[in-house]
């Protein structure tokens, strides 16, 4: 049982996934610090003099009824920043590397493989006298 668990942990996919999660967490911390330090103060410019930030109060004199729109906008901006950076830093270079160094042809289907085998067998039969192999 422990051998199977060890094999599972040492598989390449599990290790790669663990590294990706750790790097993603660190990356989110950087983007969050950026948005807290720059984006949130910029959004506060549009919030007026309200201490609670950009949003609106549903019931006067009840701070608990404040609907904060600023954090929603900040989260959306964080998402766009993270998605754009991941695309341009990881996905795009990976796709270009696959095109350059990887196999560009699509994987052959079963029918194509069977046709190739048929053609090879037909060539082989044509080379032997009588077109048949003797066993």
Image (tube, helix red, strand yellow):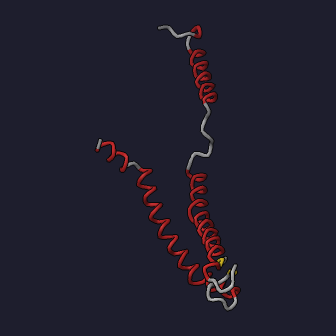
Name the image quarter holding the N terminus.
top left
Question: Does residue 4 appear to the left or right of 25 in the view shown?
Answer: left
Residue nearest the viewer, comparing 88 with 101: 88
Spot occupied by residue 29 in the image (x, y as percentages of width and height): 50, 73
Spot occupied by residue 126 in the image (x, y as percentages of width and height): 60, 15
The number of discs equals 0
- The extreme bottom residue here reads 49
Quadrant in the rendering for residue 15: bottom left
- The extreme left residue here reads 2
Whether residue 111 is situated above or below residue 49 in the rendered picture: above
Q: Which residue is depicted at the point 71% across and 86% down?
A: 46
Question: Does residue 135 appear to the left or right of 85 in the view shown?
Answer: left
Quadrant in the rendering for residue 3: top left
Spot occupied by residue 111 in the image (x, y as percentages of width and height): 63, 27
Question: Does residue 113 appear to the left or right of 6 in the view shown?
Answer: right
Residue nearest the viewer, comparing 125 with 114: 114
Q: Which residue is depicted at the point 62% across and 33% down?
A: 109
Residue nearest the viewer, comparing 34 with 74: 74
Q: Which residue is depicted at the point 70% across and 89% down?
A: 48
Residue nearest the viewer, comparing 104 with 33: 33
Q: Which residue is depicted at the point 53% across and 79% down?
A: 33
Spot occupied by residue 119 in the image (x, y as percentages of width and height): 62, 23
């Amino acid at each position: 049982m422990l051998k199977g668990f060890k094999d599972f942990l040492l598989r390449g996919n599990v290790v790669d996934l663990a590294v990706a999660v750790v790097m993603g967490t660190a990356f989110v911390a950087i983007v969050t610090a950026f948005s807290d330090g720059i984006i949130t103060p910029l959004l506060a410019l549009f919030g007026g003099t309200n201490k609670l930030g950009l949003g609106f109060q549903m019931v006067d004199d009840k701070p608990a009824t404040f609907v904060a729109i600023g954090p929603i906008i900040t989260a959306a901006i964080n998402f766009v920043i993270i998605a754009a950076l991941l695309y341009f830093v990881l996905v795009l270079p990976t796709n270009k590397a696959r095109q350059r160094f990887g196999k560009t042809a699509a994987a052959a289907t079963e029918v194509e493989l069977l046709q190739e085998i048929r053609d090879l067998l037909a060539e082989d039969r044509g080379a032997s006298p009588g077109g048949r192999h003797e066993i």
